Image (tube, rainbow, N blue to C red):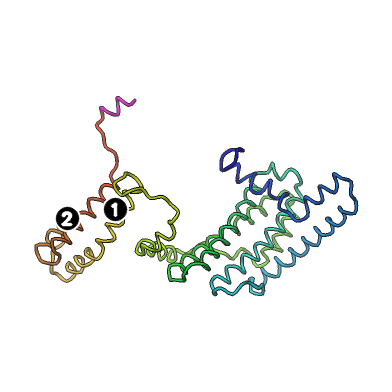
Protein backbone atom coordinates (compact mmCIF):
# COMPACT_ATOMS: atom_id res chain seq x y z
CA UNK A 1 0.00 0.00 0.00
CA UNK A 2 1.36 3.41 -0.94
CA UNK A 3 0.52 6.90 0.26
CA UNK A 4 -2.23 7.18 -2.34
CA UNK A 5 -4.76 5.49 -0.09
CA UNK A 6 -6.60 2.25 0.48
CA UNK A 7 -6.53 -1.07 -1.36
CA UNK A 8 -9.33 -0.10 -3.73
CA UNK A 9 -7.30 2.84 -5.05
CA UNK A 10 -4.23 0.64 -5.44
CA UNK A 11 -6.29 -1.78 -7.52
CA UNK A 12 -8.16 0.75 -9.63
CA UNK A 13 -5.37 3.22 -10.35
CA UNK A 14 -1.87 2.33 -9.12
CA UNK A 15 -1.35 -1.23 -10.40
CA UNK A 16 -2.59 -0.71 -13.92
CA UNK A 17 -3.35 2.98 -14.38
CA UNK A 18 0.24 4.03 -13.67
CA UNK A 19 1.91 0.79 -14.69
CA UNK A 20 0.36 0.71 -18.17
CA UNK A 21 2.64 3.49 -19.36
CA UNK A 22 5.71 2.69 -17.28
CA UNK A 23 5.81 -1.00 -18.21
CA UNK A 24 4.74 -0.80 -21.84
CA UNK A 25 7.62 -1.43 -24.27
CA UNK A 26 6.62 1.42 -26.60
CA UNK A 27 4.18 3.93 -25.06
CA UNK A 28 6.72 5.77 -22.90
CA UNK A 29 9.11 6.01 -25.85
CA UNK A 30 6.32 7.46 -27.99
CA UNK A 31 5.44 10.05 -25.35
CA UNK A 32 9.08 11.03 -24.88
CA UNK A 33 9.60 11.35 -28.63
CA UNK A 34 6.57 13.63 -28.93
CA UNK A 35 7.74 15.77 -26.01
CA UNK A 36 11.23 16.11 -27.53
CA UNK A 37 9.91 16.55 -31.09
CA UNK A 38 11.94 13.56 -32.30
CA UNK A 39 10.11 12.41 -35.43
CA UNK A 40 12.39 9.48 -36.28
CA UNK A 41 12.27 8.09 -32.75
CA UNK A 42 8.50 8.45 -32.71
CA UNK A 43 8.14 6.63 -36.03
CA UNK A 44 10.33 3.77 -34.81
CA UNK A 45 8.35 3.47 -31.59
CA UNK A 46 5.00 3.75 -33.38
CA UNK A 47 5.73 1.05 -35.96
CA UNK A 48 7.18 -1.14 -33.23
CA UNK A 49 3.97 -0.61 -31.28
CA UNK A 50 1.82 -1.55 -34.28
CA UNK A 51 3.83 -4.73 -34.84
CA UNK A 52 3.49 -5.50 -31.14
CA UNK A 53 -0.30 -5.19 -31.31
CA UNK A 54 -0.55 -7.27 -34.48
CA UNK A 55 1.68 -9.99 -33.04
CA UNK A 56 -0.31 -10.20 -29.83
CA UNK A 57 -3.59 -10.31 -31.75
CA UNK A 58 -2.39 -13.19 -33.92
CA UNK A 59 -0.92 -15.03 -30.96
CA UNK A 60 -4.01 -14.61 -28.79
CA UNK A 61 -6.32 -15.76 -31.59
CA UNK A 62 -4.27 -18.82 -32.62
CA UNK A 63 -3.68 -19.96 -29.03
CA UNK A 64 -7.39 -19.58 -28.26
CA UNK A 65 -8.32 -21.71 -31.27
CA UNK A 66 -5.79 -24.44 -30.44
CA UNK A 67 -6.43 -24.60 -26.70
CA UNK A 68 -2.99 -23.04 -26.09
CA UNK A 69 -1.34 -26.36 -27.01
CA UNK A 70 1.07 -25.12 -29.67
CA UNK A 71 2.95 -22.68 -27.45
CA UNK A 72 6.26 -23.91 -26.07
CA UNK A 73 6.81 -23.90 -22.31
CA UNK A 74 9.48 -25.35 -19.98
CA UNK A 75 9.25 -29.07 -19.28
CA UNK A 76 7.94 -29.40 -15.70
CA UNK A 77 4.89 -31.62 -15.43
CA UNK A 78 1.78 -32.15 -17.52
CA UNK A 79 -0.41 -30.13 -15.14
CA UNK A 80 2.16 -27.37 -14.80
CA UNK A 81 2.81 -27.25 -18.54
CA UNK A 82 -0.87 -26.89 -19.43
CA UNK A 83 -1.19 -24.16 -16.82
CA UNK A 84 1.74 -22.24 -18.35
CA UNK A 85 0.35 -22.68 -21.86
CA UNK A 86 -2.95 -21.12 -20.84
CA UNK A 87 -1.09 -18.30 -19.08
CA UNK A 88 0.85 -17.63 -22.29
CA UNK A 89 -2.44 -17.32 -24.14
CA UNK A 90 -3.89 -14.92 -21.57
CA UNK A 91 -0.66 -12.93 -21.46
CA UNK A 92 -1.07 -12.16 -25.16
CA UNK A 93 -4.78 -11.45 -24.64
CA UNK A 94 -4.01 -9.09 -21.75
CA UNK A 95 -1.37 -7.19 -23.75
CA UNK A 96 -3.75 -6.83 -26.69
CA UNK A 97 -6.65 -5.71 -24.50
CA UNK A 98 -4.40 -3.18 -22.76
CA UNK A 99 -3.32 -1.63 -26.05
CA UNK A 100 -6.89 -1.47 -27.36
CA UNK A 101 -8.12 0.08 -24.11
CA UNK A 102 -5.36 2.70 -24.14
CA UNK A 103 -5.86 3.39 -27.83
CA UNK A 104 -9.63 3.85 -27.64
CA UNK A 105 -9.90 5.53 -24.24
CA UNK A 106 -6.66 7.50 -24.09
CA UNK A 107 -6.13 9.44 -20.89
CA UNK A 108 -9.68 8.77 -19.74
CA UNK A 109 -8.68 5.16 -18.98
CA UNK A 110 -7.31 6.29 -15.61
CA UNK A 111 -10.67 7.81 -14.77
CA UNK A 112 -12.56 4.67 -15.77
CA UNK A 113 -11.43 2.91 -12.65
CA UNK A 114 -13.66 -0.14 -13.04
CA UNK A 115 -12.06 -0.96 -16.38
CA UNK A 116 -8.52 -0.31 -15.15
CA UNK A 117 -9.36 -2.26 -11.99
CA UNK A 118 -10.36 -5.31 -14.04
CA UNK A 119 -7.13 -5.06 -16.02
CA UNK A 120 -5.28 -4.89 -12.70
CA UNK A 121 -7.12 -8.02 -11.58
CA UNK A 122 -6.03 -9.80 -14.73
CA UNK A 123 -2.40 -8.80 -14.21
CA UNK A 124 -2.47 -9.74 -10.52
CA UNK A 125 -3.91 -13.19 -11.16
CA UNK A 126 -1.30 -13.89 -13.84
CA UNK A 127 1.39 -12.91 -11.35
CA UNK A 128 -0.08 -15.13 -8.61
CA UNK A 129 -0.45 -18.00 -11.06
CA UNK A 130 3.19 -17.68 -12.10
CA UNK A 131 4.23 -17.71 -8.45
CA UNK A 132 2.24 -20.89 -7.83
CA UNK A 133 3.97 -22.62 -10.76
CA UNK A 134 7.36 -21.54 -9.38
CA UNK A 135 6.50 -22.97 -5.98
CA UNK A 136 5.25 -26.22 -7.51
CA UNK A 137 8.52 -26.50 -9.44
CA UNK A 138 10.73 -25.82 -6.41
CA UNK A 139 9.01 -28.00 -3.81
CA UNK A 140 8.93 -31.82 -3.68
CA UNK A 141 6.02 -33.07 -5.76
CA UNK A 142 3.23 -34.75 -3.81
CA UNK A 143 -0.49 -35.42 -4.06
CA UNK A 144 -1.37 -32.31 -2.06
CA UNK A 145 0.87 -30.14 -4.27
CA UNK A 146 -0.79 -31.57 -7.40
CA UNK A 147 -4.25 -30.83 -6.01
CA UNK A 148 -3.23 -27.34 -4.92
CA UNK A 149 -1.80 -26.56 -8.35
CA UNK A 150 -4.97 -27.82 -10.04
CA UNK A 151 -7.13 -25.70 -7.74
CA UNK A 152 -4.98 -22.58 -8.17
CA UNK A 153 -4.78 -23.01 -11.94
CA UNK A 154 -8.54 -23.43 -12.33
CA UNK A 155 -9.28 -20.49 -10.02
CA UNK A 156 -6.68 -18.16 -11.54
CA UNK A 157 -7.57 -18.90 -15.16
CA UNK A 158 -11.26 -18.39 -14.42
CA UNK A 159 -10.59 -15.07 -12.68
CA UNK A 160 -8.41 -13.89 -15.58
CA UNK A 161 -11.11 -14.86 -18.05
CA UNK A 162 -13.82 -13.05 -16.09
CA UNK A 163 -11.67 -9.92 -15.73
CA UNK A 164 -11.09 -9.77 -19.50
CA UNK A 165 -14.78 -10.38 -20.19
CA UNK A 166 -15.63 -7.57 -17.80
CA UNK A 167 -13.38 -5.21 -19.76
CA UNK A 168 -14.87 -6.28 -23.09
CA UNK A 169 -18.42 -5.88 -21.79
CA UNK A 170 -17.76 -2.32 -20.68
CA UNK A 171 -15.55 -0.78 -23.35
CA UNK A 172 -17.52 2.19 -24.72
CA UNK A 173 -16.59 1.48 -28.36
CA UNK A 174 -18.84 -1.53 -28.86
CA UNK A 175 -17.70 -2.45 -32.38
CA UNK A 176 -14.08 -2.55 -31.23
CA UNK A 177 -15.08 -4.56 -28.16
CA UNK A 178 -17.01 -7.06 -30.30
CA UNK A 179 -14.05 -7.60 -32.64
CA UNK A 180 -11.67 -7.91 -29.70
CA UNK A 181 -13.91 -10.52 -28.08
CA UNK A 182 -13.92 -12.49 -31.33
CA UNK A 183 -10.10 -12.49 -31.33
CA UNK A 184 -9.60 -13.37 -27.66
CA UNK A 185 -12.54 -15.75 -27.17
CA UNK A 186 -13.35 -17.18 -30.63
CA UNK A 187 -14.71 -20.36 -29.01
CA UNK A 188 -16.37 -18.62 -26.08
CA UNK A 189 -15.48 -18.47 -22.39
CA UNK A 190 -14.47 -22.05 -21.64
CA UNK A 191 -12.73 -21.83 -18.27
CA UNK A 192 -14.69 -22.81 -15.17
CA UNK A 193 -13.96 -22.30 -11.46
CA UNK A 194 -12.55 -25.21 -9.41
CA UNK A 195 -15.00 -28.03 -8.82
CA UNK A 196 -16.44 -28.69 -5.37
CA UNK A 197 -14.79 -32.12 -5.36
CA UNK A 198 -11.34 -30.64 -5.97
CA UNK A 199 -11.90 -28.00 -3.30
CA UNK A 200 -13.01 -30.69 -0.86
CA UNK A 201 -9.89 -32.76 -1.58
CA UNK A 202 -7.62 -29.76 -1.04
CA UNK A 203 -9.35 -28.79 2.20
CA UNK A 204 -9.16 -32.35 3.53
CA UNK A 205 -5.49 -32.64 2.60
CA UNK A 206 -4.63 -29.39 4.38
CA UNK A 207 -6.49 -30.51 7.50
CA UNK A 208 -5.02 -34.01 7.58
CA UNK A 209 -1.47 -33.23 6.43
CA UNK A 210 0.17 -31.08 9.09
CA UNK A 211 3.36 -30.71 7.06
CA UNK A 212 1.44 -29.44 4.03
CA UNK A 213 -0.42 -26.91 6.17
CA UNK A 214 2.79 -25.67 7.76
CA UNK A 215 4.41 -25.38 4.35
CA UNK A 216 1.62 -23.09 3.15
CA UNK A 217 1.73 -20.94 6.30
CA UNK A 218 5.47 -21.01 7.00
CA UNK A 219 5.76 -17.20 6.83
CA UNK A 220 2.72 -16.54 9.04
CA UNK A 221 3.31 -15.86 12.72
CA UNK A 222 1.31 -18.19 14.95
CA UNK A 223 1.03 -17.09 18.62
CA UNK A 224 1.48 -19.61 21.44
CA UNK A 225 -1.39 -22.01 22.02
CA UNK A 226 -2.41 -20.37 25.29
CA UNK A 227 -3.16 -17.03 23.58
CA UNK A 228 -6.69 -16.19 22.48
CA UNK A 229 -7.24 -16.10 18.73
CA UNK A 230 -5.07 -17.80 16.12
CA UNK A 231 -2.82 -19.47 18.68
CA UNK A 232 -5.73 -21.12 20.49
CA UNK A 233 -7.36 -22.07 17.18
CA UNK A 234 -4.20 -23.77 15.91
CA UNK A 235 -3.74 -25.59 19.22
CA UNK A 236 -7.36 -26.78 19.12
CA UNK A 237 -6.84 -28.08 15.59
CA UNK A 238 -3.75 -30.02 16.65
CA UNK A 239 -5.64 -31.61 19.54
CA UNK A 240 -8.64 -32.40 17.34
CA UNK A 241 -6.45 -34.08 14.72
CA UNK A 242 -4.75 -36.11 17.43
CA UNK A 243 -8.16 -37.31 18.64
CA UNK A 244 -9.44 -38.32 15.18
CA UNK A 245 -8.18 -41.96 15.24
CA UNK A 246 -9.68 -42.48 18.70
CA UNK A 247 -13.03 -41.03 17.63
CA UNK A 248 -12.98 -43.25 14.53
CA UNK A 249 -12.50 -46.33 16.72
CA UNK A 250 -15.45 -45.33 18.90
CA UNK A 251 -17.67 -44.80 15.84
CA UNK A 252 -16.66 -48.22 14.55
CA UNK A 253 -17.61 -49.77 17.90
CA UNK A 254 -21.04 -48.09 17.68
CA UNK A 255 -21.57 -49.44 14.15
CA UNK A 256 -20.64 -52.94 15.31
CA UNK A 257 -23.12 -52.74 18.18
CA UNK A 258 -20.49 -52.83 20.93
CA UNK A 259 -21.62 -49.42 22.20
CA UNK A 260 -24.99 -47.73 22.46
CA UNK A 261 -25.39 -44.35 20.81
CA UNK A 262 -24.95 -41.41 23.17
CA UNK A 263 -24.23 -37.67 22.81
CA UNK A 264 -20.76 -36.17 23.15
CA UNK A 265 -18.78 -36.98 26.25
CA UNK A 266 -21.29 -39.59 27.37
CA UNK A 267 -20.24 -41.77 24.44
CA UNK A 268 -16.59 -41.34 25.40
CA UNK A 269 -17.42 -42.47 28.94
CA UNK A 270 -19.25 -45.53 27.63
CA UNK A 271 -16.27 -46.37 25.40
CA UNK A 272 -13.94 -46.15 28.40
CA UNK A 273 -16.15 -48.40 30.51
CA UNK A 274 -16.44 -50.93 27.67
CA UNK A 275 -12.68 -51.05 27.15
CA UNK A 276 -12.81 -49.61 23.65
CA UNK A 277 -10.41 -46.85 24.74
CA UNK A 278 -8.05 -46.51 27.69
CA UNK A 279 -7.60 -43.75 30.26
CA UNK A 280 -4.94 -41.96 28.24
CA UNK A 281 -7.12 -41.89 25.13
CA UNK A 282 -10.08 -40.71 27.20
CA UNK A 283 -7.94 -37.80 28.42
CA UNK A 284 -6.96 -36.95 24.83
CA UNK A 285 -10.63 -36.81 23.85
CA UNK A 286 -11.46 -34.64 26.86
CA UNK A 287 -8.60 -32.26 26.06
CA UNK A 288 -9.67 -31.96 22.41
CA UNK A 289 -13.30 -31.39 23.38
CA UNK A 290 -12.37 -28.65 25.86
CA UNK A 291 -10.11 -26.90 23.33
CA UNK A 292 -12.81 -27.12 20.66
CA UNK A 293 -15.45 -25.64 22.93
CA UNK A 294 -13.13 -22.84 23.96
CA UNK A 295 -12.41 -21.60 20.44
CA UNK A 296 -16.04 -21.77 19.24
CA UNK A 297 -17.48 -20.13 22.35
CA UNK A 298 -18.90 -16.63 22.01
CA UNK A 299 -18.79 -13.84 24.58
CA UNK A 300 -21.68 -13.91 27.04
CA UNK A 301 -22.89 -11.21 29.39
CA UNK A 302 -25.95 -10.28 31.39
CA UNK A 303 -28.55 -7.82 30.03
CA UNK A 304 -27.54 -5.30 32.70
CA UNK A 305 -24.02 -5.17 31.27
CA UNK A 306 -25.41 -4.37 27.82
CA UNK A 307 -27.49 -1.53 29.27
CA UNK A 308 -24.41 -0.06 30.94
CA UNK A 309 -22.45 -0.23 27.68
CA UNK A 310 -25.16 1.78 25.92
Residue 146: x and y, percent?
A: 47, 69
Residue 39: x and y, percent?
A: 90, 51
Foreground label between 2 and 1 = 1
| Above or below 65: residue 49 | above
- Mark 1 is surrounded, within 10 Å at the Cα level, by few (under 14), some (14 to 19) or many (20 or more) other residues, namely many
On residue 265, which mark appears? 2
| Above or below 59: residue 31 | above
Q: What residue sits right under mark 1 in the picture?
A: 236
**What secondary structure is marked by label 2?**
helix
Residue 287: x and y, percent?
A: 21, 54
Along the line of sight, the residue nearer the viewer: 2 or 258: 2
Are the residues tagged 2 and 1 within 8 Å (C-beta)? no
| Above or below 31: residue 125 | below
Quadrant including the N terminus: top right
Q: Is residue 173 magenta?
A: no
| Magenta-colored segment: predominant secondary structure | helix
Please provide the residue range marked out in magenta.
Answer: 304-310
Residue 184, quarter of the rendered image = bottom right
| Above or below 17: residue 210 | below
Name the residue at 58% across, 71% down.
Answer: 82
First in residue order: circle 2 vs circle 1: 1
- Mark 2 is surrounded, within 10 Å at the Cα level, by few (under 14), some (14 to 19) or many (20 or more) other residues, namely few
Name the residue at 74% across, 67% down.
Answer: 58
Quadrant including the C terminus: top left
Name the residue at 12% across, 61% down.
Answer: 270
- Total of numbered circles in the picture? 2
> Left or right: where does residue 191 sit relative to residue 181?
left
Residue 62: x and y, percent?
A: 70, 70
Amino acid sequence: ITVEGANILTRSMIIYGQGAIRCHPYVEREISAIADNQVEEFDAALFGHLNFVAGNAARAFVLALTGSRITRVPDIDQNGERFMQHLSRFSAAFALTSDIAMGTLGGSLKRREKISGRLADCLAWMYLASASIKRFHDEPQSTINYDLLKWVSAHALYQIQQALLGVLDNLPHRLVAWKLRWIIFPLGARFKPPSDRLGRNVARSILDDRQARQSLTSDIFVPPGDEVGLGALEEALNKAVRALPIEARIKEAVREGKLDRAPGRQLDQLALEAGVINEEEFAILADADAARNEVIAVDAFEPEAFVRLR
